[in-house]
Image (cartoon, coloured by chain):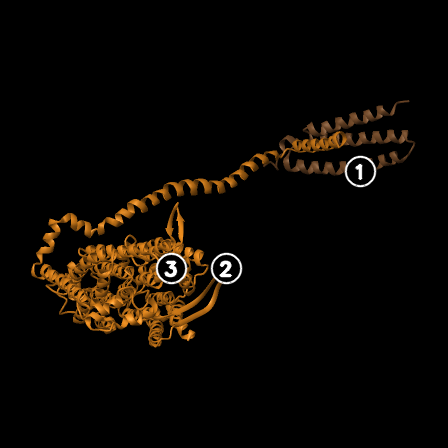
Chain colours: A brown, B orange
Amino acid sequence: MVPLSWYIALSAAVFCIGVVGVLSRKNIIIIFLSIELILNSVNISLCAYSHFLDSLRGQVFVFFIMAVAAAEAAIGLAIIIALYRNKETISTAEINLLKW
Amino acid sequence: MMFKYALIPFLPLSAFVINGLFGRWMKEQAHWVPIAAVLTSFVLSVITLFEVMGGQVGGGQIYSWIVSGGFDVHIGFKVDQLTAVMLIVVTTVSSLVHIYSVGYMHGDKGYPRFFAYLALFTFSMLMLVMADNFLQLYVFWEAVGLCSYFLIGFWYEKKSASDAAKKAFVVNRVGDFGFGLGIMLVFVTFGTLNYDTVFAAIGGHAGETVNILGTQIGLFTVIALLLFTGAMGKSAQLPLHVWLPDAMEGPTPVSALIHAATMVTAGVFMVARCHPIFNQSQAALDVVTWVGGITALFAATIALTQYDIKRVVAYSTISQLGYMFVGCGVGAYTAGVFHLMTHAFFKGLLFLGAGSVIHAMSGEQDMRMMGGLKKKIPWTYWTFLLASISISGIPPFAGFFSKDEILWKAFESHGAGHTVYYLLAIAAFLTAFYSFRVIFMTFWGESRAEGEAAHHVHESPKVMLGPLVILAALAVIAGFAGVPEAAYGSNWFHGFMANVFGGGHEGAMAEAVAGHGLEQTMMLVSVAIGGSGIALAYYMYMMNPELPGKLAKQYWTLHDLLYKKYYIDELYDAVFINPIKAASTGFFWKVVDVGIIDGIVNGAGSLVVWTSGGLRKIQTGYYHHYAFGMALGVFVIVGLFLFIL
């Protein structure tokens, strides 16, 4: 069997990759991609626990998270389109309207 | 009874309120209410005088003002012979000045305001003389000083007038500082400020001393000297006399009322009222005598050289106030108050007469521009002449009896008074001289007036002449109230005031037995002094008119010293005024106010700006900085909970 700790480690690793991506990428679409990575890392962890605890709860929760992630992606892309229409860019390095 | 007493000051107060509120609409009719109020007060004062003559003294309290622990002060009245005399003096002169002002201030744009201030002054002065406790005395002492400020600076747009008003008030405050300390010491000693209670308790504190900077000084000496500093300021004695000549910037009726008859006599009144305290300290009495005597001579010498007619009369006032203080200092309080009364009449007349002359000369005040007015303004001339004869001490005019009594009491006293007699005698000679110098320069001889003024010389209207005539009559007959026994009179005034000052101090009873030879001789000496002063003035100004000019050139250092008033104003400027101004501008303004205080206030603001300037740099506007901040916060809190808590 694959030990539980490996799944958790995988989940943590993916989570960290996602967080680093959110913090350090300039392209907004890549940032959203990283956010999806974070959400899916949580999915991995939930499924692992669901299998090891012999409960379907974890997997049902995964469905909820996927639904939320999809809805959020839709709204997020709408925001990106609106942003592009106004600022002609999708690079966060060029957006600093709230600067003091 | 109390209501009648209360009406005397409160009628002028209501006149002030009415003129103050409605003066703008009363305009040229603004004088009716104040004149009616003051004349009514005069009538009530006369009634009070007759009652007091019949033996009815008293008074009482009308309002409980401060009741705090052991400190009780009420507004009340003390009506005795001294009060009655002062009431008559104040209301008489005030009524006459009010009437005179109708003519003198005619057409002035501040006409209603003038009468409002005169009424307020009359109220304050009446409350002062009727007070029955020290605090009421002090409050209305300040109030008359305030009214003096208003009235001296009446033509406030003129810088010299507002400067003079400021000077009067500040110099008065210097004296009042000592006065306030004296009153506090009275309270600390006696536990009360009520006259009757304090005077009755004096015996219990006889011989006590106070520790001042290590030495033990008599308690009553300290109290009396502190009270006297207030009198020095208010009554313009050396060294606090400097405000009175400058106060001539005010309209002449003001000079007559305030700076001749009433306010400046408040100091003498206070010393007379507090005589039980002064009598406990020979040292203080000696100080009073010396200050009075030196001031009398000092001011008389300055009056010799002045050319402004009002200045001469102002220095004359300072000099005569010195006489009154000498009278009090040798224990002859009755004589001092008697001279206060006669002086109010003839000095008030001299000022109003001077005002009439100035009115006739279209505003000219310099005597070098006058002359030959005798025929042109006869009424003014004759009344002025009567006043001058009175002040020179020629019998049977009022000034002779009051001045001579002071001279006699000083001569026969032992110690300071006797020496001061010689100062007063010289001052009497000088007084006669400079008074008649004014007469000869202003009214006799040829006219030296030029241009416009020369053509418009005219007698003053009847409303101004009437008060002059009344005061002249008083200046002539008022002396008969106090004809001494040596001159075959009964000295009615002395007997009248006996209830206040005691029937007769040491020597008076012995007098009646021993005969009056010496006193009669001294009377003749006084008349001779006055007469020779007049004669010298006649010689120098009528028979030999070049002589004053020649003497002035020959003895120019002495002349300069006198003309420049002994350089005292310059001395005060150098020692007090300019150092304070320099310290204020250089240090207190630039360093303390602008640097430190403004620095702290502005600095508080700058600190906030600087801090916020630093803090706002966090708001970069960049998404990834904010995201990083959020992530950092999450990790810190999670770490906190995992590892520390």
Q: Is residue B544 left or right of residue B218?
A: left
Residue B511 position by quadrant:
bottom left
Q: Chain of mark 2?
A: B
In what element is the residue under mark 2? loop
Residue B316 position by quadrant:
bottom left
Q: Amino acid at mark 2?
A: Gly
Discs 3 and 2 lie in a common subunit: yes
What residue is shown with label 2? B70
What residue is shown with label 1? A68
- Quarter the N terminus of chain B occupies: bottom left
Q: Do the residues bearing badges 3 and 1 touch, measured as CB atoms within 8 Å?
A: no
Q: Chain of mark 1?
A: A
Question: In terms of depth relative to the viewer, which is nearer, B52 or A8?
Answer: B52
Residue B287, above or below A7: below
Name the spot of residue B546 as percent of width and height, x first.
8, 56
The local crowd at label 3, few if under 14, some if 14 to 19, many if 20 or more residues have their Cα within 10 Å, is some
- Mark 3 vs mark 1, CA separation in Å: 87 Å
In what element is the residue under mark 1? helix
Closer to the observer: label 3 or label 1?
3
Q: Which mark is residue B142?
A: 3
